[in-house]
Amino acid sequence: MPLFVVKRDLPGVTPEILQSAGIRAKSCCAEITGEGQPVRWVRSFYLPETEQTHCYFEGVSKAVIEEANQRARIPFTGIVEVVEMTPEMV
Amino acid sequence: MIISDAELAASFAIFAAKQAGAEEVTPDHLLLGCLQTISRFGIATIGPWDLDLQQMGVDWIEPPDGARPKVAYSQGAVDLYDRAARIARSTGEKRVDVDHLLVAFAMEEDGLMGELKREYGITSASWRAALAHVRSGAAGTPAPAQAESEKKIAREYLTPEEAAEALGVHVQTMRAYIRSERLPAYRVAGERAIRILRTDLAKVLEPLGKER
């Protein structure tokens, strides 16, 4: 499945808010997958210096990723498809 | 992937919202989801209160099929998740569990929680105390009833309740594994009773490395 990064600006975010968002993201992904459109939250990185979060999702389309984040009520500034590369791949 | 009780509660909450034809998952749906997660036979027991899900309009036996509207979390539900996460952190627990979500409702005076408070004479303190005892009762020296239960789960074939106890998950989680066919289950011939082979329990366990 294609991989996407969801970018968020979260000034003043706390670990608790990130954890709360994580549960909502997982439950909404499970729900949308159950509706027939596979989507999965893979992992997230928080960048303390810029107070941004990069959340990686697998899904059939950008629209599905957008829907999962909207349903979970987690704000975002953009969603773009990414190409994964790991040391094992080179 | 193993579903936590908090995720199961979220799943029930989403279903409750869909069942009600709502556009958003409200705090009421979230409370219903939490109660359904800890319930047995449609009754959620917290401290001295037996809360009847059926009376609250929940179809606890079998969720109806069919197309349902899409729902998003309401801001009220988001606030409760945030509060539950703060409660979990304040007690030094890394994960948000269903009891943290239930405790997060202690201060609520409106909606379903408000109705329950008025009907059962629940106060913020008595609700928190009841939930605190549920959690502390899970630790420490096994009570006689617990020792008996441990003896039962040493058998080769387990009931869903015993299997849930052996794995340390809620019985609704165990039923979800069975429904999704992640865990084989068997009917006793000619009976409604379901049994799970103890050695099959490992099938729902995954090494942590797989998540990385």
Image (spheres, coloured by chain):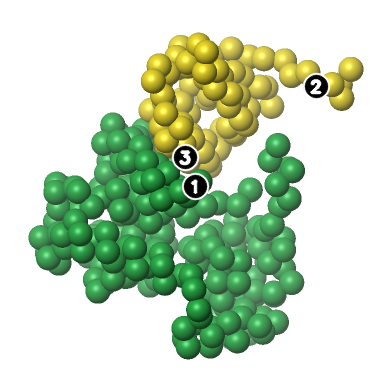
Asked which secondary structure carries label 1, the reply is loop
Can you identify the residue that label 1 sits on? B95
| Residue B116, position as x, y percentages in the image | 17, 60
Asked if the residue at tag 1 contacts the one at tag 2, i.e. Cβ–Cβ closer than 8 Å, the answer is no
Chain under disc 1 = B
Q: Nearer the viewer, mark 3 or mark 1?
A: 1
Asked which secondary structure carries label 2, the reply is loop
Amino acid carrying label 2: it is Thr
Place residue B211 in its image quadrant. Answer: top right
Label 3 crowding class (10 Å Cα cut-off): few <14, some 14-19, many 20+?
many
Label 2 crowding class (10 Å Cα cut-off): few <14, some 14-19, many 20+?
few
The answer to whether residue A61 is seen in the rendering is: no
On the rendered structure, is B78 left or right of A84? left
Chain under disc 2 = A
CA–CA distance between discs 2 and 1?
A: 29 Å
Amino acid carrying label 1: it is Arg
Q: State the hue of chain B.
A: green
CA–CA distance between discs 3 and 2?
A: 27 Å
| Residue A27, position as x, y percentages in the image | 48, 41
Co-location on one chain, circles 2 and 1: no
Residue nearer the viewer, B169 or B82: B82
The answer to whether residue B40 is seen in the rendering is: yes
Residue at the image position 63 percent from the left and 14 percent from the top? A81
Can you identify the residue that label 3 sits on? A23
Chain under disc 3 = A
Q: State the hue of chain A.
A: yellow
Residue at the image position 71 percent from the left and 52 percent from the top? B206
